[in-house]
């Protein structure tokens, strides 16, 4: 099946709308196109800016996103953090009781690892 550019872009926006309809507390698109100061990972979930994170060194903004033909961007994490236990370069989200429920919760992520 062939899809036009508009159909591919609509897929991304339909996904964004579906995620928003679920009412997530935190929703990080990692789609900042420039490096803001401070380097904030904006939360589009219901917590708003109270759930913002901070990118650590090694992140690169404005990478191609997951949906081919869509103008939405992504972030890449390419550095190695020798000060962390796993060597990863995280986005740090400060403690917020709403993001630390006592019961069950779900997490969803789109990743494209490269080795």
Image: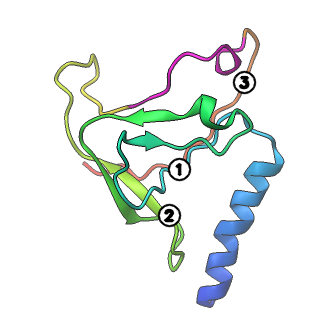
- Numbered label attached to residue 7: none
Decide if residue 2 is on the left or right side of residue 36.
right
| Magenta residues (range) | 91-101
Q: Earlier in the sequence, mark 3 or mark 1?
A: 3
36, above or below 66, in the image:
above
Residue 49 in the image: x percent, y percent?
61, 36
Tell me which residue sits at (19%, 34%) in the image: 80
Dividing the image into 4 quarters, which one contains the N terminus?
bottom right
Tell me which residue sits at (37%, 39%) in the image: 38
Mark 3 residue element: loop
Q: How far is disc 2 from disc 1 in space, using C-alphas? A: 8 Å
Decide if residue 115 is on the left or right side of residue 19.
left
Residue assigned mark 3: 105
Tell me which residue sits at (50%, 75%) in the image: 68
Residue assigned mark 1: 110
Q: Earlier in the sequence, mark 2 or mark 1?
A: 2
Residue assigned mark 2: 66
């Amino acid at each position: 099946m062939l899809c036009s550019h508009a159909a591919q872009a609509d897929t991304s926006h339909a996904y964004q709308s579906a995620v928003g309809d679920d009412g997530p507390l935190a929703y990080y698109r990692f789609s900042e196109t420039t490096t803001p100061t401070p380097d904030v990972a904006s939360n589009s979930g219901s917590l708003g800016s109270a759930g913002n994170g901070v990118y650590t060194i090694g992140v690169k903004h404005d990478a191609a996103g997951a949906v081919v033909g869509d103008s939405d961007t992504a972030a890449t994490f390419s550095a190695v953090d020798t000060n962390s236990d796993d060597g990863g370069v995280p986005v740090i989200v400060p403690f917020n009781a709403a993001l630390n429920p006592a019961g069950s919760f779900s997490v969803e992520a789109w990743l494209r690892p490269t080795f």
